[in-house]
Amino acid sequence: MFSFIAEIWLFLKVRKKFWLLPVLIVLGLLGGLIVMSQGSAIAPFIYTLF
């Protein structure tokens, strides 16, 4: 997992695509929210947002 993050960071640094960093962070947070709420009672409410 760490090597994947290191590769993405290297890609962003070499190609000067730092504007992609907030997009990747938000996508990661949304994905984590969906995974964490999968078995809880909050899940139906989160899926209605999308």
Image: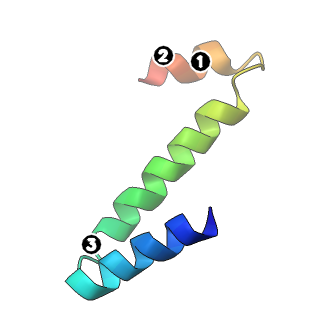
Q: On residue 48, which mark appears? A: 2
Judge whether 19 appears above or below 28 on screen: below
Q: Are marks 1 and 2 in contact (CB under 8 Å)?
A: yes
Other-residue count near label 3 (Cα within 10 Å), few / some / many at <14 / 14–19 / ≥20: few
Near-viewer residue (31 or 41):
31
Q: Is residue 18 left or right of residue 49?
A: left
Query: Circle 1 is placed at which residue position?
Result: 45
Q: On residue 36, which mark appears? A: none
Query: Circle 3 is placed at which residue position?
Result: 19
Q: Gap in Å between the C-alphas at discs 2 and 3?
A: 29 Å
Q: Gap in Å between the C-alphas at discs 1 and 2?
A: 5 Å
Going by the numbered disc 3, the residue's amino acid type is Trp
Q: Are marks 1 and 3 in contact (CB under 8 Å)?
A: no
Going by the numbered disc 2, the residue's amino acid type is Thr
Q: Position of residue 22 (x, y in %)?
A: 39, 65
Other-residue count near label 2 (Cα within 10 Å), few / some / many at <14 / 14–19 / ≥20: few
Q: Which quarter of the image is occupied by the C terminus? A: top left
